[in-house]
Image (spheres, rainbow, N blue to C red):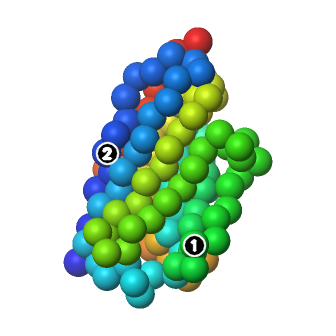
Amino acid sequence: QVQLVESGGGLVQAGGSLTLSCVVSVNMYSINAMAWYRQAPGKQRELVAGISNFGETHYENSVKGRFIVSRDNAKGTMHLQMNGLKPEDTAVYYCNFGNTYYSPTQAWGQGTQVTVSS
């Protein structure tokens, strides 16, 4: 059974930084696309950033230049370093994986809440 556990969220002032972590219960060497997603209140879940097994990264325009995604297959972890946080980054953040960033599994974890105050 696939398990995804996110952590590292919290309350931060605008301009601050947080680093999120994701622990994956499956062999990450076999996973191509891993990604972070977020869901703000009243909005649909959206892709934030992704990283392939080759280390290629993808960022949505809203976070480009501020967020950095990384993965460690040996440790079974993925991280999202978030800098220059804005109130509009407030959301529950989730990690997931799939063949592409736009086709995640249905095994969503609990997510981790990020709240950015102005």
Quadrant of the image containing the C terminus = top right
Residue type at the position of mark 1: Gly
Number of marks: 2
Q: Residue furthest right?
A: 61
Residue at 49% across / 60% down in the picture? 70
Pointer 1 or 2: first along the chain: 2
Residue type at the position of mark 2: Ser
Residue at 37% across / 29% down in the picture? 10
Q: Which mark is residue 7?
A: 2
Q: Answer with left or right where residue 12 lies relative to residue 111.
A: right
Q: Position of residue 84 (x, y in %)?
A: 61, 29
Q: Residue furthest bottom?
A: 30
Under circle 2, the secondary element is strand
Of the pair 73 and 24, the residue shown nearer to us: 73
Above or below residue 27? Residue 93 is: above
Disc 1 marks which residue?
Answer: 55
Residue at 23% across / 78% down in the picture? 1
For the residues carrying marks 1 and 2, which lies nearer the camera in this image? Answer: 1
Q: Position of residue 109 (x, y in %)?
A: 33, 57
Q: Compute the Cα span from label 1 to label 2.
A: 22 Å
Q: Is residue 7 shown to the viewer in this render?
A: yes
Above or below residue 113? Residue 26 is: below
Q: Position of residue 117 (x, y in %)?
A: 52, 15
Residue at 60% across / 56% down in the picture? 49
Q: Is residue 41 shown to the viewer in this render?
A: no
Q: Answer with left or right where residue 56 lies relative to residue 20.
A: right
Above or below residue 36? Residue 90 is: above
